[in-house]
Image (cartoon, grey):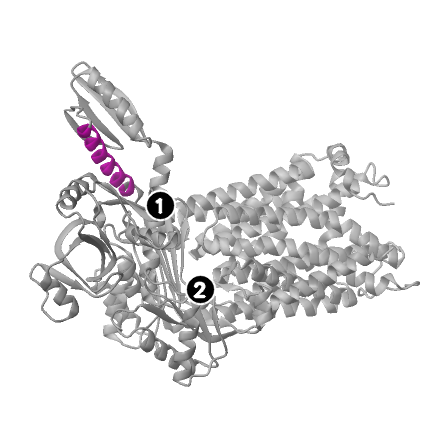
Amino acid sequence: MNRYPLWKYVMIAVTLVLGLLYTLPNFFGESPAVQVSSGKATIKIDASMLGRVESILSADKIPTNGILFDGNSVKVRLPDTDTQLKAKDALSRALNPDATDPVYVVALNLLSASPHWLGNLRALPMYLGLDLRGGVHFLLQVDMKQALSKRLDSSAGDVRTLLREKGIRHTGISRTGDNIEVNFRDDETRARAKDLLSTELPAMTVVDTGSGGDLKLLLGLRPQAEREVLDTALKQNITTLHNRVNELGVAEPVIQQQGADRIVVQLPGVQDTAKAKDILGRTATLEARLVDGSVEAQNAVLGTGPVPFGSELFKVGRGAPVVLRKQVIFSGQQLTGAQATFDENQRAAVGIQLNDAAGRVLRQVSRENIKKPMAVVLFERGRGEVLTVATIQSELGSRFQITGMDSPQASNDLALLLRAGALAAPMEIIEERTIGPSLGAENISKGFNSTLYGFATIAVFMIVYYQLFGLFSALALAVNVLLLIALLSLLQATLTLPGIAAIALTLGMAIDANVLINERIREELRRGISPQVAISEGYERAWATILDSNVTTLIAGVALLVFGSGAIRGFAVVHCLGILTSIFSSVVVSRGFVNLWYGRKKRVSKLAIGQVWKPST
Amino acid sequence: MEFFRIRRDIPFMRHALAFNIVSAVTFLLAVIFLATRGLHFSIEFTGGTVMEVGYQQAADVQKVRDTVEGLGFADSQVQTFGTARDVMIRLALRKGESSARQSDQVMSALKADNPDVQLRRVEFVGPQVGAELATDGALALLFVVIGIMLYLAIRFEWKFAVAAIVANLHDVIIILGFFAFFQWEFSLSVLAAVLAVLGYSVNESVVIFDRVREKFRERAAKGMPTPQVLDHAITSTISRTIITHGSTQIMVLSMLLFGGPTLHYFALALTIGILFGIYSSVFVAAAIAMWLGVKREDLLKPVKKKDDGQPELP
């Protein structure tokens, strides 16, 4: 009766092997590494960087334990921290000749020291939260009202242009709250305007209001358009933040959306919060300017003459060196959109939308400068970088395209850069957490020790009190830890200190199931039932109770997961997973041990479950 | 080895009134402390900045205090924690000022005083986040209460559900009462501990109710009065109760001893929760179920239907 079918043993064995496999990477620790990634959105790292890094390091005779390219960055594994520093210096000297303007981010990092074949199985160590590895965490709130307001401003400009183009007379356009109000004298004009605006501006609702001599059209953003505005604003801010964080030389920054209007920025290993805050909060600007095509300017590019008055020489970026006029045609604040698209010949292009005022200026400037080049420059920290130089083919308005891109990838990159020039909406830091690296290491060892000592005490107690069955229970508990860590590593869930606390607590709670089972078996024995039947009944009867009690605990865990944030979520994830693994290990696995031990014996006269006391009455 | 050698069922229910009076008094005290002293909320809920700095030698707290106050942070608290070298600085939220800058200001002032100082941890929480966390916490509590009651009502009977939840909410209030009385810091992790305890100590009631149901089903026990059935259920599970809670408490104690200051209040909340959890779910919940008048018939009908899938034992 106490025998498992073979498949059950096989299942347990397979689970254990998988658990062991995915837990394994956590034991190897981490080895020092240097990571090279792109510091500018204009530069992409590809596999050729691998060779470059290799040759730089071999030229300096720096030994490595392997170089790998992961799609975005090149990582060099190094034998020790001394070589790590040397390699970092050598690489940044060779890759960034101008130290004040780094092209590549060369950052110190830690790579899992587990063997390669484990990595191929996607067996990675647990992902440690900032409280365990040290670093900075920011929560930024994006001011969505501003993003909407910007969008409405630009729509008001569109309305004005459309009405003027069609010769429809209005008596004024104004913004009232979340609406645009257009005034008209007579009903007929208003009807014409309404037709025009509803077809031309599909993102807006157009409604008649007012009466008598005060006729109005009320325009508002449709809910879907509104969502789109907010969505793009958030994405744009995230992109901008990405570009800025690159400068800090952080190996693995996390920049993510949280909720509808918040962005989380986590910078592991960064200690200088003042600098980080400064860089994240910086404002970048984008400017479009005409290229100075004069002979003096040509000479200045070649370095044979001075830069002409009223112009400026730019050395960095695409199409550089180039001399540009100082006069700005439009700036980043006036840019309302930029997307990768295709022109009429199906070549990659970037579509650009400007607000009304900038469109008017550009129309005039472009009319006077057809067939002449225009450049877009991104200014950050007072340094300009040329994003693109393109020739004006015809008169341009508030919507135009930059064509002649090599590939859709190139147009994507440029659109991103144009958008990323400035934040779509202002942001505010609403949460900040900095954890020093020593505190992080301390947290790990404290969390680990408390779990270990607690586990050891429970295991000793169980074995003393329940003997062989206690040993099985302790083994099941160990399996529980193994499976839980394997699961956390597999899911790459972030492990935090509350998470470690949850592991400890879950273990403390998980033993409950085994205590229930063992007590039941003793009770059956006390009633004078034969050992084999007692085992089977003990497990059967305890099962309903175990299920009930775990479900109630799980309800609390899920509530924490749903409503919790930050510290609580880290706790809840581990807690919930732990409840699931504990049901498996304490019921299925411990029964497996018992069956393996007692199930095959024909005659069992006594169970090693400790003393079973019987009242002598 | 066997700790519990009980010959006869212990007549717990005879003393039900006494148990209930004891818990009513503790509960009332907890409510009074909560009302008069209130909880000492951490900055996660109130908003503000906490900094932990470390010195090479024992810190001169008074000097740090002066420096911080010199910067115009009047409403600040400076105290050592853990060791004499670690100092915790709390800054209240100031309207208008981008509060994220506060920590930079303080840190550079402290560095000017003593270059030894090392920043160990900064935590800044804006007011909107704090308010959200408070509502989320309340929602989570509500969700747990409703979820557990529903589950117990389906699995057992509404009287048990009410009894279990009343007993365990009374634990929650008592934990909060302790935090109010001692003015321990009530942080997010303490909230997590409180909710985890709520789920955990309901277990206890579930185990006893399971026994009650089993006893009610037994033909031999027909005609046994309800209080006696409850006594039997509690007596036969007491060994498991003590051992399980003892094991969990070992783990929690280990966290309390070795987990450092970050886990201190978390472990403390769990300890109180576990101790009162035993008491309330064993004595209070069963007694309430008794007052509510649980009968054999209550459990037998719905359970038979629900439990078709359960293996029936020979």
Drawn side of residue A68 relative to residue B85, left or right: right
Drawn side of residue B247 relative to residue A560, left or right: right
Q: From where the camera sits, is residue B162 visible?
A: no
Q: Quadrant of residue A315?
A: bottom left
Residue at position x 78%, y 60% from top?
A9
Horizontal and vertical percent for residue A496? 49, 61
Q: From where the camera sits, is residue A221 visible?
A: yes
B228 and A210: which is toward the camera: A210
Placement of A6 over or under A341, stated as above or below: below
Residue at position x 57%, y 60% from top?
A488
B263 and A330: which is toward the camera: A330
| Residue corresponding to mark 1 | A341
Q: Quadrant of residue A121?
A: bottom right
SS state under label 2: helix
Q: Please tell me whether residue A517 belongs to the stretch shown in magenta.
A: no
B83 and B259: which is toward the camera: B259
| Residue corresponding to mark 2 | A131
Residue sitting at the far left: A309
SS state under label 1: strand
Q: Please tell me whether residue A151 belongs to the stretch shown in magenta.
A: yes
Q: Which residues are magenta?
A: A146-165
- Chain ID, mark 2: A
Q: Quadrant of residue A538?
A: bottom right
Q: Main secondary structure of the magenta part?
A: helix
